[in-house]
Amino acid sequence: MVRRLPWREVPACLAAQLIGAAIGALGIVVILGTDGAIVGNLGATVFAPTTGYVQGIVIEAIEVSVLMTVIMGAAVDGRAPQGFAGMIIG
């Protein structure tokens, strides 16, 4: 979004995200076992039974907007306090 990541690094970044997700899912299986993996959907987010598709999209859009505002304000904005971006974003 802010054009700080060169396009040649995008494939490696995407691969790292996918590998991290797979390791996280494996960690759920190792720690919670197969029953925990079934209940927890291997960490995948799912809608509640009463949440409709459009409602879920709106909720996710709001959540992503808030998260991106925090990330851009804490990590990218020059006025943000230095060294605290990870803690603020987390």
Image: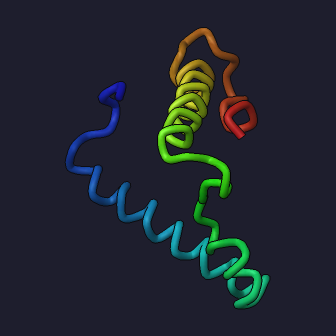
The residue nearer to you, when weighing 62 against 52, is 52
Residue situated furthest bottom in the rendering: 34
Residue situated furthest top in the rendering: 79
The number of callouts visible is 0
In the rendered image, the vertical position of residue 38 relative to residue 21, given as above or below: below
Image quarter of residue 24: bottom right
Query: What percent of the width, then of the height, locates residue 21?
Result: 53, 67
In the rendered image, the vertical position of residue 77 relative to residue 21, given as above or below: above
Image quarter of residue 3: top left
Residue shown at 66%/57% (left/top)?
A: 49
Residue shown at 72%/87% (left/top)?
A: 30
Q: Quadrant of the N terminus?
A: top left
Residue shown at 43%/66% (left/top)?
A: 18
Name the colour scheme. rainbow
In the rendered image, the vertical position of residue 45 relative to residue 38, given as above or below: above
Judge from the rendering whether residue 58 lies leftward or rightward of residue 12; answer left or right.
right
Judge from the rendering whether residue 77 lies leftward or rightward of residue 42; answer left or right.
left
Query: What percent of the width, then of the height, locates residue 39?
Result: 73, 76
Query: What percent of the width, then of the height, locates residue 34?
Result: 70, 90
The residue nearer to you, when weighing 77 against 90, is 90
Q: Quadrant of the C terminus?
A: top right
Residue shown at 76%/81% (left/top)?
A: 36
Judge from the rendering whether residue 13 lies leftward or rightward of residue 59; answer left or right.
left
The residue nearer to you, when weighing 76 against 44, is 44
Judge from the rendering whether residue 76 lies leftward or rightward of residue 47; answer left or right.
left
